Amino acid sequence: MLAATLERGLAHDVAALLNRIAKDAAAHVASGQGAIAAGVVDHYHAALLRIYHARLEVAALESAKLVIEELTGGKKFLDLIDLARSSIMDWLTNYAAEKVVGVLKTTKKIIRKALRDGQSEGESLRDISKRVRNETGGLIGKARSITIARTEVGAATAIGADAAADASGLQLDKEWCATEDARTRPAHAAADGQSVGMDEDFSVDGEALKYPKDPTGSAANVINCRCVCLYNPRIPG
């Protein structure tokens, strides 16, 4: 499945970066520079931004291509992709910048907490350094990167699909389509089949969402959401 492949790619890149940050911060702690260990995070801003741009652009464009093909049968494909790409890049410029700041801010908090916990336990610099490395990178960083990738790729594919539907120029309605299993949020299951116009929002658990995984939505409605948006030609009358 394309989405799973894209998620694995982003998760791999984010996990690798978190491991680099963890190693760098831990080295500062081991050398007695724990007070500035969290500051190393800022050095990785540009690298993480490049990862976000590269991975999410691909995710959004692949999603857009699928929707354009489905809606138009490939007619004016390149022209429509160019229109969708313009919208996608406008979104990505702001979204990636905001999300990268958030990821790095959380990483600083993780490092500082590891330092405080180690100090409160009376650990040696070596042990605190190990704690910082393990809690910032390693298996914990890998698990965190998977959650990040699932959320961000989901947002990018949703944006790509919406940009493509808008670029098609067709009169469309949007339909919320939930995954029908025990893991689906009750509110999302209840929204299944809800249909609105392209310029309207879905109402999900009392919250207005433009589409499933809408980045402006609350974490409770967005993180790990597996719902998708269907774009249906509007029936006259």
Image (cartoon, rainbow, N blue to C red):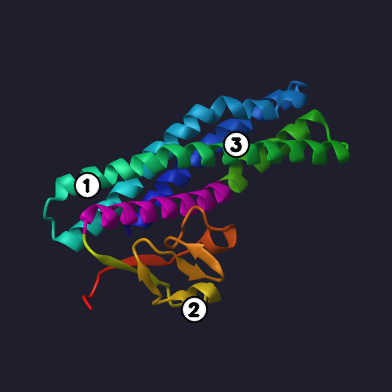
Q: Residues within 10 Å of mark 2 (few under 14, many from 20)?
A: some
- Residue depth check, mark 2 versus mark 3: number of the one nearer the observer: 2
Say which residue appears at 49% left-offset and 72% top-offset: 188
- Tell me the CA gap for discs 2 and 1: 33 Å
* Image coordinates for residue 65, horizontal then vertical, percent: 24, 52
* Image coordinates for residue 5, horizontal then vertical, percent: 36, 52
- Which range is magenta? 142-169
Residue, disc 1: 81
Three-letter residue code for mark 2: Ala
Q: Residues within 10 Å of mark 1 (few under 14, many from 20)?
A: many
SS state under label 1: helix
Residue, disc 2: 190
Residues at marks 2 and 3 touching, judged by CB atoms closer than 8 Å: no
Three-letter residue code for mark 3: Leu
Say which residue appears at 34% left-offset and 48% top-offset: 60
Circle nearer the N terminus (2, 3) = 3
Whether residue 160 is in magenta: the answer is yes
Say which residue appears at 35% left-offset and 40% top-offset: 89
* Image coordinates for residue 135, horizontal then vertical, percent: 67, 42
Q: Residues within 10 Å of mark 3 (few under 14, many from 20)?
A: many
Residue, disc 3: 104
